[in-house]
Image (spheres, rainbow, N blue to C red):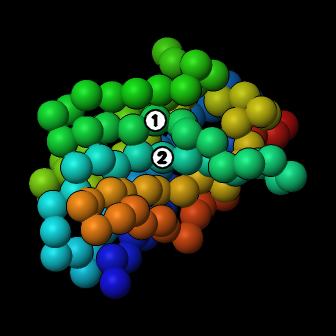
Amino acid sequence: QVQLVESGGGLVQPGGSLRLSCVASRSSFTFYNMGWYRQAPGKQRDLVATIGSSGNTIYADSVKGRFSISGDISKKTLSLQMNSLKPEDTAVYYCNARDFMGQYWGQGTQVTVSS
């Protein structure tokens, strides 16, 4: 069973920065995409940013210009640099990975933006 482990969440003031990391293990196949999603209380889980095996990236409009996704899909590692954080960025952030067998989720890491 593929395991994704996130780290780097926490409490930060508005305007601050955080960096999330994700590492995959127990994976036998090559990922073709990895990404970050988030879920705020009472809301659905939404895409934040993804990166493909060719390095192509996709960002939600709400985070463009503030967040930056990076990683090495071949090494199954992923990061999300989050700058200029806003209270509305508060959510549980989940790492996601996809191979030809399906998709996998981490357990999530809490990000809270509050003064």
Residue matched to label 1? 49
Q: What element carries label 2?
A: strand
Residue farthest along the front direction in this orientation: 101
Residue 81: in sight, yes or no? no
* Quadrant of the frame with the C terminus: top right
Mark 1 to mark 2: distance in Å? 5 Å
Q: Is residue 2 above or below residue 56?
A: below
Q: Residue furthest top?
A: 65
Q: Which label number is shown at residue 36?
A: 2
Residue 35 vs 57, above or below: the answer is: below
Q: What amino acid type is highlighted by mark number 1? A: Ala
Residue 77 seen in this snapshot: yes
Give me the residue at 15% from left, 34% from top: 54
Q: Which residue is drawn at 54% across and 37% down?
A: 48
Residue 53's image quarter?
Answer: top left
Q: Do the residues labelled 1 and 2 touch (CB within 8 Å)?
A: yes
